[in-house]
Amino acid sequence: GGREANQVSDDYRYQDGNYEGYAPNDGYYRGGDEPAHEEDAQSDVTEGHDEDDEVYEGEYQGIPHPDDIKEKQKKRAPAVADEYRDRADLMAERMEDEEQLAHQYENIIEECGHGRFQWTLFFVLGLALMADGVEVFVVGFVLPSAEKDMCLSSSNKGMLGLIVYLGMMVGAVMLGGLADKLGRKKCLIISLAINAAFAFLSSFVQGYGFFLFCRLISGLGIGGSLPIVFAYFSEFLSREKRGEHLSWLCMFWMIGGIFASAMAWSIIPHYGWGFSMGTKYHFHSWRVFVLVCSLPCIASLVALKFMPESPRFLLEIGKHDEAWMILKQVHDTNMRAKGEPERVFTVSYIKTPKQVDEFIEIQSSTGTWYQRWLVRITTIFKQVWDNVLYCLTAQYRMNTLMLAVVWFTMALSYYGLIVWFPDMIRYLQEEAYESRVKIFDEEEVSHFTFNFTLENQIHRNGEYRNDKFIGMKFKEVRFEDSLFEECYFENVTSSETFFENCTIISTVFYNTDLYEHKFINCRLINSTFLKEKEGCHLDFEEDNDFLIYLVSFLGSLSVLPGNIISALLMDKIGRIKMIGGSMLISAVCCFFLFFGNSESAMIGWQCLFCGASIAAWNALDVITVELYPTDKRATAFGILNGLCKFGAILGNSIFASFVGITKVVPILLASSALVGGGLLALRLPETREQVLM
C-alpha cells in the first residue's frame, strides 16, 4: 500500500506551477505544458526553413499535427511499470520489437559486409564441427584393437559403439538449450572443453567401465557443440550468404571423417607406437590414435577464446552496447581487409527487444554458496524447459513435428547404413575366408613339436600323443572329437580357437591363453593349467583390417561433390527442394544395394549413397537455423539433433542385427524412411528469402 501511495504522489507532484506527467487526453494543444523558455531559446512557432532546408527563426509554421501532440503527451505520461502489465502485452511488445530488430540487423550485417571476420570464424567453428565428425568414427576404428586390449565381449563392443551417440543425444538437447540463455560462445567453450578433457582422459584409462564413461561424457560435450556452431555462425551472415556458407561449413564434418580415417590407417597398425609400465598398464598405438583425434577440438577451443559473442544473442538479452561494439569490430575488420579502412560504421542505435524473463540476482549474504548456485541453476533450467515447450506451441508445432520426422528418418537410414556397409564388407570377407578353410580328418600325430602358426583349420577325430605345442599361435582353429594325451602346451596364444567334444588326458598348459571357455563339452583328465596369461593380447598384423579404414576414408571423401553442389545451389533452388530431392535420390541408391555381392560393389554403392545424401543434411541444418527465432534457435536445433542421434542408435542396432541374415529388410527400411521423409520435407516452408528472426 505504501508503494502505491508513493507512486501516486510522484505522478501528481507539483513542480514549477505544472503537474509533472499529467496530460489531459482531450486532443487540444497546450503550449503552456512546455518548459519555461530561456531568453535565447528558440520558439517552435517561429522556426522556418531556408532554401537549403536549414532551420531558422522568424517564420510561423502553423499548429502542430495532432499525432505529434499525442506523441509528446505519451512521452510525458507516466509509464506503467512492467510488473503491473499483463504478460501477454509484454510478449506482444517483445514480438513487435523482435520483428523490427530482425530487419534492422539484416541491414547492419549487410553494411558490415562478408569478409575476413566471417572467414576467420568459419575456420574456428569448422574445427569444432570437424571434432564432431572425428568423434563419430573414433570408436569404430579402435574397436578391433580395444576388444583385444580390454577383453571385450560382443555386448560390450555394442555398448561402446552406441554410448557415444547416447552422449551426443543428451548433450545436444542440454547444451543447445543453455546456449539460448548463457550465450553461444560460452556454451561452445564448455562443450569443447568437456569433449577435449574426457577424450584425452579416455586414451589413458585401462578399464572398460571407465573408458565407457569417458567416451559417454566426451560425446555429451561434442554433441552440444553441433547446434551451437550453426546458430553461432548463422548470426554473422546476411540473408544472401547464409545458405551457401552454412553449407560450406558442413564440409568440415567430411574433413573430420577423412582425418580420422587417415590417422587410424597411419597410427593403429604400428604396435610399437606405445609403451608399457609393468604388466598392468599398456599404452598401445590405438590409444595414441584416440589422443591425436582430440587435437581438432583443442585447436578450436583455443581459437574460440579470441572470437566475440554473437551480437544477435546480446541484443536479445538487452546488451546493446556490447553488441554494437562487436558489430563495429566486424565492420572494421572487413573494411580493413578490403582496403577501405576509412569507411565508417554508420549505425548508432540498434533496437533491443522488451525483456520479459525474470532474472534472479541473489545477494551474497543470502543462504550458503551452494543454495545460491542451486537457485541460479534451477532458474536457468526452468527457462530452458520453457524454451523446449515453446517449440511445441501453435506457432511452431507443425514445423517442429515435420522437421522431427525428417531428421529422424534421415538419421535412421544414414547412420544405419553407414554401420551396415562395413559390417557387410567384413561379412563378405569372413565368407571368403571360411571358404578357404582346411579340414583334417582322423590324423594321428605323436612325439612332434608344433612351433609354427596354425590358421583357418578344422581337425576332426584326431589323436595327439606326447606332442609339444611351444611358442605358437592358433588362429581360427577348431579341434573336434579329438584326443590329446600327455601333451605339453607352453607360451601359446590363440584367436577364435576352440576345442569341442575333446578328451584331454595328463596334459600340461603353461603360460597360455587357452581359458576354460575355449573347451566346449570336453573331458579334462589329470590335466594341469599353470600360470595362465593375463589380459588380452594384440596381434596387429593379423587382426587389423586395412580395408575398413579405406572404406571409411572413401565414404567420407565421396561427400565432397555433394557438398560443393549443395553449397552452390542452396540459395538458388531453395532448402526444401534440396532436402526432398536429395532424400529421394538417396532412396533410389538404396535399391542398387541388392546388386552389391562383392566388396568392391559395396564400397561403390556406399560412396554413391553418401554423396547423394549429404545435400539433405546440409539443407536440414540451414532450414532448422532459419525457422526459429534467436532466443529459441539453439534449443530447437538441439532437440532435433538429439532426436537425430536417437535415430542413429536405432539404426545401428536394427541394421547390424540383419548382417549375414538378409539384405532385404535393411534396404527396404532405409529406402522407405527416405521416401517418407523426403515427401514430408516438401511441405515445410521455404526460408531462403527470410530474415533471421
Image: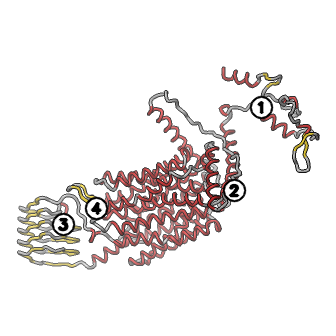
Q: How is the image coloured?
A: secondary structure
Of 7 and 465, the residue lying toward us? 7
Choose the circle earlier in sequence order: 2 or 1. 1
| Point 35% across, 57% down: residue | 160
> Which tag is nearer the camera, tag 4 or tag 1?
4
Q: Foreground: 65 or 143?
A: 65
Q: Nearer the viewer, mark 3 or mark 2?
A: 2
Task: Point out the tag, 3 or 2, that comes first from the N-terminus.
Answer: 2
**Neighbour tally class for label 4: few under 14, some 14-19, many 20 plus, Cα within 10 Å:** few
- Specify which label sits upstream in the sequence, 4 or 1: 1
Percent across and percent down for residue 418 are 43, 67
Query: What's the mark number on residue 493?
Result: 3
Q: Earlier in the sequence, mark 1 or mark 3?
A: 1
Q: Secondary structure at mark 2?
A: loop
Give the secondary structure at mark 4: loop
Residue corresponding to mark 1: 77
Instruction: Check residue 343 in the rendering and tell me which mark sits there, or answer none.
Output: 2
Spatial CA span between label 2 and label 1:
41 Å
The answer to whether any part of residue 102 appears in the image is: yes
First of labels 4, 3 by sequence position: 4
Q: Amino acid at mark 4?
A: Gly
